[in-house]
Image: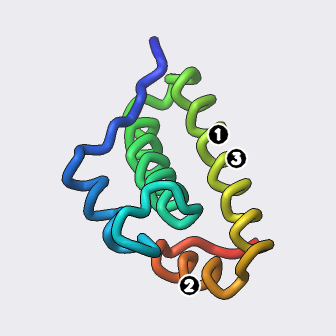
Amino acid sequence: MCYIDIVISKTKKQKLIKEVAIHDKDTGSPEVQISILTTRIEELARHLKIHAKDNHSRRGLLAMVADRQAHMKYLEKINPKRASSLQKKLGLKKK
């Protein structure tokens, strides 16, 4: 088995960016990165439900979750209000 890289379609990614972007040309803010990571995590989790023994993809999933957690921690540090509104938008639980 090999690692499956979950790629989001261009239109879906643009829609995600439009929903959480701070300004018109925003592609790198923590909100955008977290929303893209969340979508990729959901897609990979769906893949792992079908292919339970795909440990390479599971490792990638854990790396993405850790990356998203680091972005959330940074966002909470710089602006807790934006972080809580993003968590509500994406349906993420706060630890």
Q: Earlier in the sequence, mark 2 or mark 3?
A: 3
Q: Could you say which disc has been placed on residue 85 in the image? A: 2
In this picture, is 54 found above or below 20? above
Q: Position of residue 45 (x, y in %)?
A: 46, 45
| Neighbour tally class for label 1: few under 14, some 14-19, many 20 plus, Cα within 10 Å | few
Residue occupying image coordinates x 31% and y 44%: 8
- Comparing 81 with 40, the one in front is 81
Foreground mark, 2 or 3, reads 2
Mark 1 = which residue? 62
- Comparing 88 with 33, the one in front is 33
| Neighbour tally class for label 2: few under 14, some 14-19, many 20 plus, Cα within 10 Å | few
Q: Earlier in the sequence, mark 2 or mark 1?
A: 1
| Neighbour tally class for label 3: few under 14, some 14-19, many 20 plus, Cα within 10 Å | few
Amino acid type for the residue under numbered disc 3: Ala
Residue occupying image coordinates x 72% and y 82%: 80
Q: Secondary structure at mark 1?
A: helix
Q: Secondary structure at mark 3?
A: helix
- Calculate the distance from the C-alpha at mark 2 to the C-alpha at mark 1: 24 Å
Mark 3 = which residue? 66
Amino acid type for the residue under numbered disc 2: Ser
Q: Position of residue 4 (x, y in %)?
A: 42, 25
